[in-house]
Amino acid sequence: MDIKLAEISQEINNLPEEAQILLIDFIQLLKKRYPQPENITTSQPHPLNTFIEKYGAWEDERTAEEIVKEIYDSRTISNSDISL
C-alpha cells in the first residue's frame, strides 16, 4: 500500500469543515482502538545522519591538516579603518 501524504492532505483540505471535524474524531477513535506498542519509537533521525544519507561524507584527497592549513592561509586581516 503506497500512502501519499500530500494527496491525503489535499483530499482532507477539500472536505467541508464538518467532514474534517468528523475525520478528526474518527482518527482519535482509531488511535484508541489501535494504540502503538510502547517499544516502537517514532523519533526523528538526527539531522546530521539524514544529511550524510542524502549527500554522503566529505571526500577529499587532502588530509585534515592540509585542509585546516589552507583555511588559515586563506584568511586575511583587514586594516581598513571603519568609522561610524
Image (cartoon, rainbow, N blue to C red):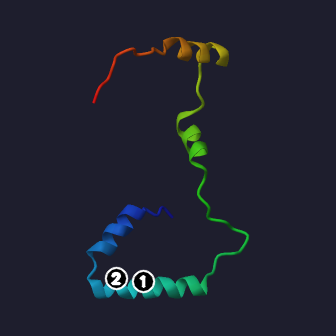
Please, is residue 19 above or below residue 49 in the view?
below
Percent coordinates x, y for residue 48 in the rendering: 59, 43
Identity, as a three-letter code, of the amino acid under mark 1: Ile
Name the residue located 39 percent from the left edge and 14 percent from the top edge.
79
Please, is residue 3 above or below residue 17 in the view?
above
User: Cβ–Cβ below 8 Å for labels 2 and 1?
Assistant: yes
Quarter location, residue 68: top right
| Outermost front residue | 83
Percent coordinates x, y for residue 29 in the rendering: 52, 88
Residue occupied by mark 1: 24
Percent coordinates x, y for residue 72 in the rendering: 55, 16
The local secondary structure at tag 2 comes to: helix
Please, is residue 20 above or below residue 70 in the view?
below
Residue 67 seen in the current view: yes
Task: Report the side of 78 relative to 63 (left or right).
Answer: left
Residue occupied by mark 2: 20
Q: Nearer the viewer, residue 83 or 21?
A: 83
The local secondary structure at tag 1 comes to: helix
Quadrant placement of the C terminus: top left
Name the residue located 40 percent from the left edge and 16 percent from the top edge.
78
Identity, as a three-letter code, of the amino acid under mark 2: Gln
Q: Nearer the viewer, residue 46 or 71?
A: 71
Percent coordinates x, y for residue 82 in the rendering: 32, 23
Residue 63 seen in the current view: no
Q: Nearer the viewer, residue 25 or 65?
A: 65
